[in-house]
Image: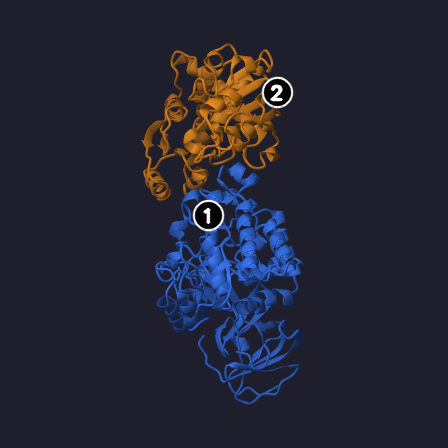
Amino acid sequence: MNMAQDEILIRGGRIIDPASGVDMVGDVLVSGGTIWKVGKKINHSRSAKVYDAGGLVVSPGFVDMHAHLREPGREDEETIESGAKAALKGGFTSIVAMPNTDPPIDSEGMVRLVIEKGEGAGAARVFPMAAITKGLKGESISEMAHLREAGAVAFTDDGNPVSNAGTMRRALEYASMLECPVVSHCEETSLTKGGAMNEGAVSTALGLKGIPSVAEEIIVARDILLSGFTGGRLHIAHMSTKESVDLIRRAKKMGTKVTAEATPHHIALTDELLRSYDTNFKMNPPLRKEDDRMALIEGLRDGTIDCIATDHAPHTEIEKDVAFDDAPFGVTGLETALGVLITFLVEAGHLTLEQMVEKLSLSPSKILGLSSGTLRPGAQADITVFDPHLEWTVSPDDFLSKSRNSPFCGMKLAGHAVLVLVSGRALYESSKERMAPRGNQPA
Amino acid sequence: MLNRKDLLGLEDLTKEEIVTILDTASSFKEVLERPIRKVPALRGKTVVNLFFEPSTRTRISFEMAEKRLSADTISFSQTGSSVSKGETLKDTAKNIEAMEIDAIVIRHSESGAPHFLARNLDSVVINAGDGSHEHPTQGLLDLLTVREKKGNLAGLKMVIIGDIAHSRVARSDIWGFTKLGADVSICGPSTMIPAEVEKFGVRVHTRIEEALEGVDVVNVLRIQLERQGQPLFPSVREYAKLFGIDGEKLKRAKSDCIVMHPGPINRGVEIDNEVADGAHSVILGQVTNGVAVRMAVLYLLVGKSAPFLPLEEGEKDH
C-alpha cells in the first residue's frame, strides 16, 4: 500500500471541493505532497502515475474529529496504528483521538505519544484531543496551554460530561485564549444512571432502564449559555435529540460560538433496532426515535449540525457478548461511515454528495483549525477517491479495526473509498488495476 | 405444539399460541387432581433450572411441573456482581448444555438475559422472569385463572395496580390480556408509570378510585423497593393510603370482581388482609394454575418428540 510518489494524476473523476465551490469532472495533479493543479484536462509529465477515476468522486480527505483509539490502556480493543489504518480504509485522512484512555491524555507527554504513534502508523494522520480536566475527573482544568502547544487540537472529557458548571465555565474561558474548541459530552448523569437505551416505548417494552432525551438537552442548554457567557468556543459532540438540534439552531441565530456534530449511526438507526437485545446497538448517547433521527438530518441540511463524526468506539467481542445491561456502550464506525452516509443521506435524497463531503472534510477541518479539507492548489494532498455506487455488505471480518462491534453488520451499503492519499502518498487503494504503471503516456 | 424453540415473553406469542397453552394447561390441571399426579410426557428429558435471582415460588412451581411430567431436573442458584453474572451466564449455560440437556429455565435480574441465552444455545430456553421485562408463565397463569373464573376474556375490564415501571408481571399481563381481548388499564403513582406505555393499548390512571370503577379483574402488584434504585414514592405509608387495596376502595369494582396478586404479598401495604383473604381473592388459585401452566409450556416446547400424551383416559389407569 505504501507507495511514495512524486507525481500522481487522478484523471477523469467528479471533483467535489466545497471550499472552492468546485463540482466538475476533471483531473487533479498531485506533486511533492501538495495539490498542484485542478482542471478539466491536465497535461502531466511522463513520470506521473495516472489513476483512472472515471465514475468516481474525488474529494478532500475526510476528517473524523471523534475517534476512540484506546491506546494506551486497551490495546486489545484498538491501537493508534490499527485505528489509523481502519480510518484510511474508511476514507479518512485525519482522525482525532479522544483522551479517555488509561492513562488519559492530560499531559504534554501523552499528547506527544499520540502524535508519535500516529506518525509511526503510516496511515491516516492522528491528532490528539486532550482532557478538559486533570485525570478526566471533572474537577480542575488541565494545563490547556501546554497541551495545546504540544499539539492538542481541542479539549474534551468525552465519555463523561463535565458535571460541574463552574469547571465548564473556567474551561471555556481559558480555552478562549487558545483558539480551539471545548468539546462537550452532553449528559446529565443524575438522569442517565443505570440507563441502557433511549427512554420510550421500546425501553418500556424491553424492560430496560431508559436514558431520557432531556438528560442530553439540559447540558446542551447549559453549555450554550456558558459559551455565550464566556465567549468560549463550544463544540457539541454526538448530538442525538430533536430538542438538542433546536437548541443549537437558536444558539447559532443568537451568534453563540457553537458547532455540533452527529454520528452516522444516529443519522441512520433508531431504538426500534434494540428489540433483539443485540449489544451492537448499545451506545451512548443511545439510538433515539425516528423524529429525532429526522431532526438530525434536517439539522445537517440547514447547517445547524456542522459536521459528521464517527464516535468510533471499539470493544472486544468478549466484552459485547454478554447480557444487555452488562455490555459497554459504543460502536465502531470508521470503516462504515461513508457507506452509511451515502446510503442513508445521499441515496435517500436528504443531502447532496457535495454537502456530505463538506460535513466530512471541510467543516471538521475548520472547527479544529486544520489545513485539510480542500483541494485548492497548494493545499496538502489529502485526497479521498470513492465510488458512490459500489455496493458492499458490511462484514466485520474484513475490518482493519481490532474490534467488530458494528451495528451495521450484514447490512448492504452503497459507497466505499477506493483510493486515499495522505500528503500525496497513496496509502490505501482498493482496486490496483486503476493505477497505471509509472511511465504511462498522458492521454 | 408451539412452532418456536423458546418461550421468552408473551409479546411475541400469537393469540392462538396463548390459547393453545391455556387449553393444554387446563388438561394438565385434571392431572393435578388425580390420585397419582404424574404423567410420562417428559420421561428421559432433562431440564435445568438456572435461577440467578432469589425466587422461591416460581422455582418450586417449575420444579413441581417438571417432576409431574417425569423430567429429570437439576436446579442451580447463583447470585453475584452484575458484570460477572453476564460473563458467567454464557459460560455456565454453555457448560450445562454440553452435558446434553433439553431445556433451561432461567430467572435473571437483567432484562433480555433469556434472549441472550436463546441466541447462544440449541436447548429450549424458558423465561422464568427477566429483570423488568417479562414473566411469561406468570402472565399465562393469570390468564388461566381469569378464564376459569370469568369464561371468555374478551371485553373484560382489568386493572393492574402498582409499580408498572419495574414489573415484568405487568408487561406479560398487558400483552396477554390485550391479545385475548380484555380492556386493560394500569394504575400507580406517576413515577411508576413507564414511558409511553399507552402505546401498548392500555389506559393509564393515577387515581385509584377512577381506575377501579366497574372493573372485573384487579391485579395488585407487589411493591418492589429493592428494584427502584432511587425512591419512587415518598413513603410506604403514603403509598398504602393512596394505592393500597382495601375493602372500601374495592367497592368501586364490580360486585363479582376477582382480586389477583403474583405474590409474595406485602400485607397492609399494597393489599389489606381482608381483601387478600376475602371472597374476591383468587390468589391461591393462581399458585395452583402456575404448576399447570408451566407443565403446559414444558410439554409444548420440550415434549415435541414425546409420544402422544394420553391425558384423557390412559393416565387414569396409573
Q: Nearer the viewer, residue A286 or B291?
A: A286
Q: Nearer the viewer, residue A351 or B312?
A: A351
Q: Name the side, left or right, on which A93 lies relative to B252.
A: left
Indicate the amino acid at tag 2: Leu
- Residue A303 pos. (x, y %): 64, 61
Q: Chain of mark 2?
A: B
Q: Nearer the viewer, residue A315 or A181?
A: A181
- Residue A228 pos. (x, y %): 57, 58
Task: Give a yes or no on whether discs 2 and 1 share a subunit.
Answer: no
Vertical order, A57 against B234 (above or below): below
Which residue lies under the disc numbered 2?
B156
Which residue lies under the disc numbered 1?
A279
Residue B209 visible in the displayed image:
yes
Instruction: Using the image, tell me which numbered label, if any, was put on residue B187.
Output: none
- Residue A367 pos. (x, y %): 55, 66
Instruction: Give the crowd class for mark 1: few <14, some 14-19, many >=20 residues within 10 Å.
Output: many
- Residue A136 position by quadrant: bottom left
- Residue A167 pos. (x, y %): 45, 55
Vertical order, A141 against B66 (above or below): below
- Spatial CA span between label 2 and label 1: 39 Å
Q: Chain of mark 1?
A: A
Q: Dot 2 lies on which element?
A: loop
Indicate the amino acid at tag 1: Thr
Residue A312 visible in the displayed image:
no
In the rendered image of this protein, which colour is used for chain B?
orange
Q: Name the side, left or right, on which B244 lies relative to B254.
A: left
In the rendered image of this protein, which colour is used for chain A?
blue
